[in-house]
Structures are given as structure tokens and as C-alpha cells.
Image (cartoon, grey):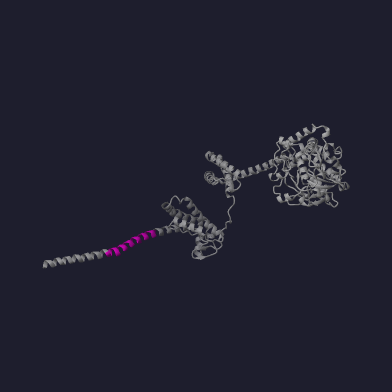
Amino acid sequence: MATFKKAATTQQRWRNFGCRKSVAVSLVVSVIAPLLFLAGRAGSFTSAFGESHSESTRKLSALEQNFPQEALKAASTDPEPLNLNIVGQDLSSSLIQEETIDVSRTDATSYQQEDPAEHTADKLEEQKLALRTSSSEEQRDTPDNSVVGGQHDGPQLLQVKVSDSGADQIGKEESNAKENPVPEPNRRKEKKGSIHDSLIRALRDQLIMGKAYATLAQAQNNLRLLQELKVQTKEIQEILLEAETDSELPNSARSKIKYMGEILERAKAQHYDCTAMVKKLRAMLHATEQEGRMLKKQSVFLSQLAAKTIPKGLHCLSMRLSVEFYSLPPERRELPHQENLEDPNLYHYALFSDNVLATSVVINSTVSTAKDPRRHVFHLVTDKLNYGAMKMWFLANPPKGATVEVQNIGDFKWLNSSYCPVLRQLESVTMKEYYFRSNNPSVATGLKYRNPKYLSMLNHLRFYLPEIYPKLDKILFLDDDIVVQKDLTPLWSINLRGNVNGAVETCGASFHRFDKYLNFSNPLISKSFDPNACGWAYGMNIFDLRQWRDRDITGIYHRWQDMNEDRTLWKLGTLPPGLITFYNLTYSLNKHWHVLGLGYNSEVKSKDIHSAAVIHYNGNMKPWLEIGMAKYKHYWSRHVMFDHPYLQQCNINE
């Protein structure tokens, strides 16, 4: 029995011990372990705090050493926040230097831990640049700057807080800034709308920089970079030759820009020298200006040359027609209806030209728009060389019942140097020197006045209409570079109100007044004419020959032409003396009778062209020349018989 009790007691003790053991384990797990864990965290926190405190102390000591003494005195005596105007540049640079060092130390580690492929050194540079610019821009642009703890009128002290989260926090802030930008009233607002043709401008800029760096690379014997730059600049030039807008660029343009940008970055790293670059760009600018002036002179010369040169096809046509004409027997060389030449009741036209094709267009277009072609008479005057060709053309191609007369200017025996001042001046030594001496300095400045038309009396024959047609009362003068689009017979019924000349005035913005044609610094001109007087156009003019004879218009022309022998009143040509001769004797016609500019102005409105009775290709770009403007050529070419055998044989095609 005693043994049994002893065993029971022992068993009860083990049971109590097991309970106590479980209680003790539970106590350790629930109380002691958390205390130990918290104690360890407290130790690490204290260690981190100590390191942070020591680092802050080190920065403060460095900051105090970099402070100017004036700033420290101001801070000790003035309770207001520190003003950067007192501290100056040294303070901001020292602060930025310390903080950016800390930024690079902290965030570089984060970048390496998180994603080294995305977080590169470019991010660090952007952060440093932001830190530097934020101080200077806020000082310069922000009227009400603030510091921690209050507001004041002066610039604020730059404060930078680097987040422990490193790149993640920066990335979040950047994304938030893009999605929800903070309004800053003093930030410069960007222009709304996309920039048109930005890729074209980028390519042009890269082309300029590529040429500049290529020169520097060649000077420093960097042949590899030089070759790369030459290849890329050549490719960019080819692209720019083909495209003028972004929409015309090839698909590879963006990759070209990117690759060229990489080459320029390498060139900048290897050869960037501000002084050398400025010198090179100035030299390039000077060379480009010189090249531009030279090209402009060449362009003027070539355009004048093209205007003066007779196309091969027209020369061929004239020769073939001449051969055909002089092979005819004399009795077959006369044009029909010659009895109409002096009938004052018919509609008479005067046309002076040596261009067979242009003359045919004028007559064909006039006849095609006339209500009764049989009442129209065309008086043509040409030179000896083209007399047979002109006559042969209208013998082979009579213009639908109209009358055509062809005269040779060489048969006008009365037109000689003793009577005509222009002929006398053209025969003078000074005039020959002006025209034919290539070393004459005035040649470069007055190139257009060396055009052969100024040497041809056909151009000046318009001042002798009463002498050529003594039995006519009215005549319509036409140039050979016009096209008639409407019936012109109403012009003969217009009352000129005692004036001699009926013409369309050219006072619009694109044309000139008297002061642009005449030399008003000469007293003879200034006391006789109004510089703001409205000019008018040759090309389609209705002349009252009775008034012409009564007022002795040809005599007025001769007097002024004699006074201009030294070319001090006006240059050469027929419009300036025409403005003088018919001054206050010109009746203004409605502008729809005569529209000008199709030989030089690419912006003539199509509604003006369609409403015009006569369109005029005045200027160098005549429709029969290759330099003629394509947009206007069809008005002229529809009156050309391109299927004519002579035109086909001479390769005159539409």
C-alpha cells in the first residue's frame, strides 16, 4: 500500500512538472522572445541613428567651413531666414556638391540592387542638373520663395531630401509629376500644338554640325570619325534633297537621326572646343553667304541667257519656213485680202515680232474668240531674217478668214539714225561699249538691259505707229507673248476721252509706280512727273492715232530720248519712255482686259486669269521656253498646232 502511494505521488509530481514546463515554454514564447527581439532592433536603431547623427555632424562642420564669414555674422545677428544674396555662389555650390554626393552614393546602390539595366548614369546626371537648376531658377523666376517654417520675400535656401527608397521613390515622383503636374505660375509655358516638320529641322541641324565636326576631325587627323561623319552627312543630304516635309521622309529617317546623334555625341566628346567650334561655324557662315551671292548671280545670268537664247526648235522652224518660202515663185508669195489693209472700218492690230510660233498663237487665239474674224486685220512687222518664214507660215496656215500683212522693218527707209534717236544712240561708241565690253563694271548690275530686244528696233517701233499706218484712225497694239481669251472688238468702241493711249494701270502691290522706272534724283524728271503716278502696262494698248498725230506724240518721244543719251533719266527699254511720252494722256481700262505676270509671278490667281480678256507672259519665263512656268503653259500651248509637219520635224512638242 505504501509502495503504491509512493508511486502515485511520484506520478503526480511528474504530471505537475509537465504542466509547469508547458507554462514556462509558453511564457518564454509569448513574453521573453518578443522582448529580446525588440532589444535587438533597438540596438540596431541606435547604431543607425548614431551613424546618421555623425554623418549630419560631419556635413554641418563642412558647411560651416565653407560659409563666408559675412553670412555667419548675418545669421548670428539677424533672426530672419538666411538670404542667398548674402551667401553668394559659394554656398549654393557647396550645398549642391554635398547633397549630390549623397544622392549618387545612396541611389547608385539602389540602382544596382533593383534594375541596373534601367537605372543608368543618365538618371544621376538628370538629378544633379535638377538640383543645380532648381536653386538658380527659383532665385531668378519665383517672386515669393519659401523656406521651411515660414514665407519671406528673398530667395530660399536650397533643401534636398533624399528618400531611402532610392530609385523607386524617384521613379514614382517622376511618374506622378507627368500624370499630375504641379502648377507653377512662373514656369515658362510651352507652345501648344506640335512642331511641324521637326524631323526635317533635326536633319538640317545634324548636317551643319556634322560638317563642322568633320572639319575639326580632319584637322586633328581623326580619320575614322571623319569617314563616319562624311558618310552620314552624305546620306542626310540625299534625304533632304528628296524630302521637304516630315511626311515625305523615308521610314529610315528616325534611325538615321538617332545614329547621327550618337556619332555627334562621340565627336563632341573627342573634339569639343568652344573656340574652335565658333571659328569653324563663322567660317562656314561666311563661305555659305559667299556661295549664296555667287549662286544668285549665276541664277540671274542663266535666266537672262535662257530668255535671250532662241530655242533650237524655233530656229529650225524659221529656217524650214524660209527655205520653203523662197522656193515659191514670186506670184505665190502674196497673202490674200490685201485690200483690207487700209480700211478704217475694220479692226486693226499691230504686232512686231521675230518669233513665228508666238505670233501664230496671238493671231490664232484672237481669231478663235472673235465674233466675225473677217473684220480683223493683223499688221505684222518682223526683221529681214524672219520675213520669209513669217509670210510662209500664214500662207500655209491662213487664220480663218482674217487678213494678215507681213512687213520687213528693213523696208522702212524713213527709219534711220538721222530721224530716230534710238538708232543714232545704238550706233554710238558709248552704247557699243556698254553692250559689248565684257569688262564693263555696269554689266553685272544691269545684265537684263543687255537683252537683244533692247538692241532691236522692233521693240521701239511702237512709237512710230502713225508713220507705219498713216491711213488708220485706231489700232490695237499687241505683244507677241500674250494670249487672247475673249473678243476684243469692244475696245474700239471705248471713248478714250481725248487721250491717246488706253491701257490697264499697274498700281497694285506687285507692280511699280513712276518712281520705280524713272530717276527722280534728276531735276528734269522730278520737276516734270509725279513719283507716285500710276504706271500702266504695254502688251495690249488701244491707240487713237488721230490724237497721236495732233499731239505730236512721236516728237515728244524723240525729245526725251535725246535727253537720255547718257542713260541718266532711265535705263534702257520702252516702258520708261512710254510712261513719259503718254504722261497724262493715258486712259485707264478695266483690269480684266489685261492680266499680267504669267512670265514671272507664280501666284497669279486663276480666277483673274479666267476672267481676263488677255493674259500676258511678261517676264523671262516665256511659255515657249523650257524655263516657262508649267502651271501657265497650257493657256498658250492649246493654240499651237503641234500636229503640224514642220513642228514635228523640228521636235516642237507639247
The question of residue 325 being in magenta is answered with: no
Q: Residue at 30% across / 64% down in the picture?
A: 30
The question of residue 42 being in magenta is answered with: yes
Q: Nearer the viewer, residue 190 or 136?
A: 190
Q: Which residues are magenta?
A: 26-50
| Image coords of residue 351 (percent x, y) | 80, 42
Relative placement, left or right, of 597 versus 5 is right
| Image coords of residue 93 (percent x, y) | 50, 55
| Image coords of residue 387 (percent x, y) | 80, 36
Number of numbered tags placed on the structure image: 0
Q: Residue at 23% across / 64% down in the picture?
A: 21
The kind of secondary structure the magenta stretch mainly shows is helix
Q: Is residue 15 visible?
A: yes
Q: Quadrant of residue 137?
A: bottom right
Q: Quadrant of residue 353?
A: top right
Quarter that holds the N terminus: bottom left
Q: Is residue 272 visible?
A: no
Q: Nearer the viewer, residue 63 or 360?
A: 360
